[in-house]
């Protein structure tokens, strides 16, 4: 058993997501990110990780959208496809 196996699940899930979301927000808010394959993949992985650990993958996508100046119309359509793939 790992060290985290003995910790209560709900607080651990919240702590992981808060750390990831706050870290991503701090990085994204200090500068505007240029949209690239690496940036998109990084935030996609963060969203998937947060979705697996606590079922909330949306904050990472929202930070990505804000940091890359993604227009809302395209974000809404792409986010739906992203969540469909993650759920599958």
Image (tube, helix red, strand yellow):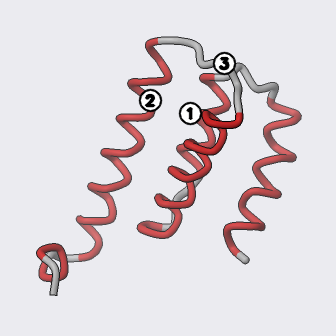
Q: Quadrant of residue 5?
A: bottom left
Q: Residue at x 75, y 67 (%)?
A: 85
The residue that mark 2 highlights is 25
How busy is the neighbourhood of tag 2: few (under 14 within 10 Å), some, or many (20 plus)?
Answer: some
Q: Residue at x 34, y 47 (%)?
A: 18
How busy is the neighbourhood of tag 3: few (under 14 within 10 Å), some, or many (20 plus)?
Answer: few
Sequence order check, earlier mark of 1 and 3: 3
Q: Are marks 2 and 1 in contact (CB under 8 Å)?
A: yes
Mark carried by residue 34 = 3
Q: Quadrant of residue 71?
A: top right
Compared to residue 16, the image places residue 36 above or below, namely: above
Compared to residue 67, the image places residue 14 above or below, namely: below
* Mark 2–mark 1 distance (CA, rounded to whole Å): 6 Å
> Which residue appears farthest toward the top when viewing the image?
31
Compared to residue 62, the image places residue 29 above or below, namely: above
* Mark 1–mark 3 distance (CA, rounded to whole Å): 13 Å
Mark carried by residue 63 = 1
Q: Residue at x 61, y 33 (%)?
A: 39
The reply, left or right, for residue 43 in relation to residue 9 is right
């Amino acid at each position: 058993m790992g060290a985290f196996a003995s910790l209560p699940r709900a607080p651990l899930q919240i702590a992981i997501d808060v750390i990831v979301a706050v870290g991503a927000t701090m990085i994204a808010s200090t500068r505007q990110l240029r949209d690239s394959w690496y940036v998109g993949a990084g935030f996609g992985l963060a969203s998937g990780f947060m979705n697996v650990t606590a079922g909330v993958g949306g904050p990472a996508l929202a930070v990505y959208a804000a940091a890359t100046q993604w227009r809302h119309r395209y974000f809404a359509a792409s986010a739906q496809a992203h969540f469909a793939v993650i759920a599958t």
